[in-house]
Image (cartoon, rainbow, N blue to C red):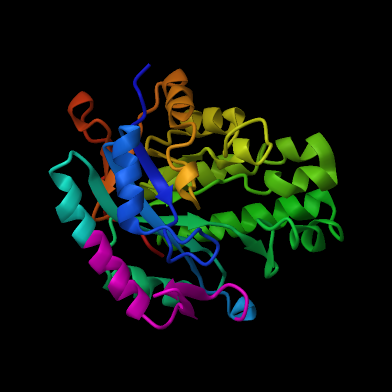
Amino acid sequence: MKLARTDYHIHPNYSIDASPVRVKDYCYRALELGLTEICFTTHLELDPVRRDIDNFAVLNGERVSVYNYAWLDKYFVEITQAQEEFRGEGLQVKAGIEVGYCQGCEKDIEKIIDNYPFDFVLGAIHCLDHIAISSMKESPHYFQPRSLSQVRKEYFSTLREAVVTGLFDALAHVDLYRRYGFREFGPEILTIHRGAIEPIFKEMVRRGMGLEINTSSLRRGLQEFHPSREIVALAAKEGVEIFTIGSDAHSLEQLGDRLDEAQALLEEFNLVNHVFSRRRAIPYPAKTAAQSPGTDGRKRRC
């Protein structure tokens, strides 16, 4: 088995739910772990209904509105400095962002990702009906009043809308509903993707989008990664070729968590881990594979 040496989902101290760990400190830890490429993916939440809850970044230790782009300016300054400092140490540092998709916010997302030189834009569904299904505290308010069929319909219709925007390079933790939905619905929630996710994967293939293997689920008590092995198999069957691996680290201790196990999952299905540069997907390590179809970095938007 090849050792995984990339972590493409890291939250430094610009994310409001992350530990106050600087970009540079994550880089030092990455070297200790033997990583060769990492990508920072600070949160970006833009839902106007949740503007007093989520729509913040951290700048110089203080919360500021995500629309105060001073935080993005400093974010890129720090990442550029890290790129220069650590390149000689054998560590590639990339600038990314994790966007919580919200219907109606497409223009705001586009304005940010088109005006800053991101290497990687990761899309995610964190909220449904303006309720955070990613939150232990909030999620019961979403799940409890709904049937499982309603959850299925709402989640996958929103996921499809996110894909169709063409704004994202890859999708994060694509079965995030398992995190707290299992408590409400039990094992039945583990199969709601069947028949719903396959056409979404077809659309992702058409648009050259990737899928993340997110290892954070295991440290939250789940039995499989996000997504589950069955969903990875479906993605492979439908022709998804671009995959990334990420620990979803919100603290220094979580960096690099279970990356090798995620790499092994990809290898089980003859799938290839990828890195990104200026929105272009590159197989990792590049010397072992030709560039995959659809990885020219040109996203097909609506």
The residue at 60%/42% (across/down) is: 197
Instruction: Report the number of discs.
Output: 0
Hey, which residue is sitting farthest top in the picture? Answer: 1
Residue 195 in picture, x, y percent from top left: 66, 39
Q: Residue furthest left?
A: 88
In this orientation, which residue lies closer to the viewer: 205 or 277? 277
Q: Dividing the image into 4 quarters, which one contains the N terminus?
A: top left
Q: Is residue 241 visible?
A: yes
The stretch of residues the image draws in magenta is 52-80
In the figure, is residue 197 to the left or right of 39? Answer: right
- Quarter of the image with the C terminus is bottom left
Please give the name of the residue rendered at 81% of the width and 58% of the height, measured from the top-left corner.
140
Residue visible at 67% across and 30% down in the picture: 223
At 26% from the left edge and 37% from the top edge, which residue is drawn? 36
Q: In the picture provided, is 228 more to the left or to the right than 181?
A: left
Q: Magenta span has 25?
A: no
Q: Nearer the viewer, residue 231 or 39?
A: 39
Rendered location of residue 293, percent (x, y): 28, 38
